[in-house]
Each structure stands twice: as C-alpha cells, then as structure tokens.
Amino acid sequence: MVIHTSYLRHLRRKNHITMTEAAQRLGISKATLSRYENNKTEVKASVLLKMADLYGVDLEELLRKGEN
C-alpha cells in the first residue's frame, strides 16, 4: 500500500497534533510514526484506519494521495 507520506505529516500539522500526541492516540511509538512520515516503513492498514479517523479524512483520501 503506497501512501504519500508527506501528506500524513501535513494532515497531522494541519490538525495541530504533535508527533507525540499522534503516536499516543494511534497506539504506536513516536519512532514508528516518524518512520511512517519519512517513508522508512510501510504504514500498517490498522494504523491507516486510525489515522483517517484522527485526522478527519476518509481512508480513500489517504490512499488516493499515495497515487499522486
């Protein structure tokens, strides 16, 4: 699953959520979130669902951004 990782960072910042807060709310470590946002690790589907909810977007939108 390809996700445009800079979009993940953009959404987090747009929602005024720190990396620490996002990691806690997603149930992952800050290091894991950093790897997701820097395209070092593929985002797990279960985390993508949580991200969509946390950032207030549809999962489909997250996936479409990966196609650009």
Image (spheres, grey):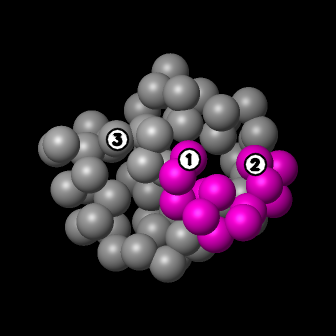
> Can you tell which mark lies on residue 42?
none
* Measured Cα–Cα span from mark 2 to mark 3: 17 Å
Instruction: State left or right for residue 25 relative to residue 3.
Output: right
Q: Residue 49 location, x and y as percent?
A: 44, 66
> Can you tell which mark lies on residue 19?
2
Disc 2 to disc 1: CB gap under 8 Å: no
Answer few, some or many: residues within 10 Å of disc 2's Cα (few below 14, many 20 plus, some between 14 and 19).
some
x 61%, y 58%: residue = 12
- Counting the numbered discs, the total is 3
Residue 17 forms part of the magenta stretch: yes
x 54%, y 36%: residue = 37
Q: Main secondary structure of the magenta part?
A: helix
Residue 66 in view in this figure: yes
Q: Earlier in the sequence, mark 2 or mark 3?
A: 3
What residue type is disc 3 on? His
Name the image quarter holding the C terminus: top left
From what the image shows, is residue 1 above or below residue 45?
above
Name the image quarter holding the N terminus: top left
* Measured Cα–Cα span from mark 3 to mark 1: 9 Å
What residue type is disc 1 on? Arg
Residue 46 in view in this figure: no
Instruction: State left or right for residue 28 relative to residue 44.
Output: right
Q: Secondary structure at mark 1?
A: helix
* Measured Cα–Cα span from mark 2 to mark 1: 9 Å
Q: Give the residue at mark 1.
A: 9
Q: Earlier in the sequence, mark 3 or mark 1?
A: 3
Q: Residue 4 location, x and y as percent?
A: 34, 41
What residue type is disc 2 on? Met
> Can you tell which mark lies on residue 4?
3
Residue range highlighted in magenta: 9-21
